[in-house]
Amino acid sequence: MTSIPVSAPARLDGKVALVTGAAGGIGKATSLALAEAGATVIATDIVDTVDFENANVIYRRYDVTSREESKATVSWILDNHKQIDALVLCAGTISHRPLTESTDEEWQSILAVNLMGVVNPVREIYPVMEGQGYGKMVALGSIAAKIGGVASGPSYVAAKSAVHGLMKWVAKAGAGKGVFASIVAPGPVETPMWETVTQRAAPSANGNVPLGRFGQPEDIAQAILFLCSPASNWITGTVLDVNGGMLMD
């Protein structure tokens, strides 16, 4: 069994991190937060270019729904940086259709990005981290997976619920091998994806969000940084709720 060090300050100097869904919102804020903590960050998304204005962030196009692109991206990182110490899974898309109006195409699209977009990088990087004897994975879950939806449809809830379960499996499998896995479950965060949710009379900042405002990407990014860093060396398999107090359990 790998010896797990005692928790230490939240620095990532000398570490290499891969972030998916990094073109904007939570993924971009997380890439910058990890870089500011000292990591070399490989920020990825399906758009061609993204300007991070941070020398520690390297952008690479990567479609997480593709197993082949997952293999190629991991190989490129190992060829150029020799290690992968943190994996942050932010790629996602949302649907609002109720069950009776949902289509096969919608289910396939939502599951491809939100579930297989986690499965593909995880199954490539888990053995890398196991071989290193160290690595931290953090996936974006959702409050919707815990309460059955906010204003999202069933396909999104099902996909995020599966992500919660997958990461707990990884946490158990990797616990004796130095591989950590956890979930950050945001409430309503003001990002382009969530604008459609907040416009659907989901939570109101002055109503059922006790802390009185919607979340910002930086609120989630700092929670992810904590779980990627040595500050969380006695935490794995957890779902960290970052929701302004909407859900307290």
Image (spheres, grey):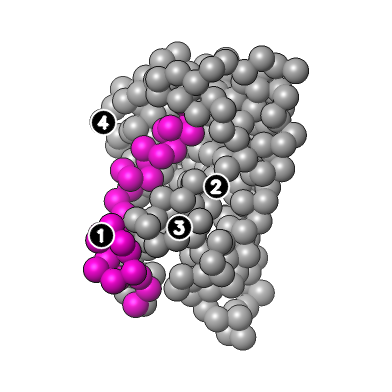
Residues in magenta? 201-229
The residue to which callout 1 is attached is 213
**The N terminus: image quadrant:** top right
142 left or right, relative to 213:
right
Toward which corner of the image does residue 211 lie, by quadrant?
bottom left
- State if disc 2 and disc 4 touch (CB < 8 Å): no
| Residue type, mark 3 in image | Met
Sequence-wise first label, 4 or 2: 4
Q: CA distance from mark 3 to mark 2?
A: 12 Å
Q: CA distance from mark 4 to mark 2?
A: 31 Å
184 left or right, relative to 124:
left
Sequence-wise first label, 1 or 2: 1
Residue visible at 31% across and 43% down in the picture: 218
- How many other residues sit within 10 Å of disc 4, few (<14), some (14-19) or many (≥20)? few
The mark found on residue 162 in the picture is none
Can residue 205 be found in the magenta stretch? yes
Residue visible at 25% across and 59% down in the picture: 213
| Residue type, mark 4 in image | Glu
The mark found on residue 239 in the picture is 2
The residue to which callout 4 is attached is 53
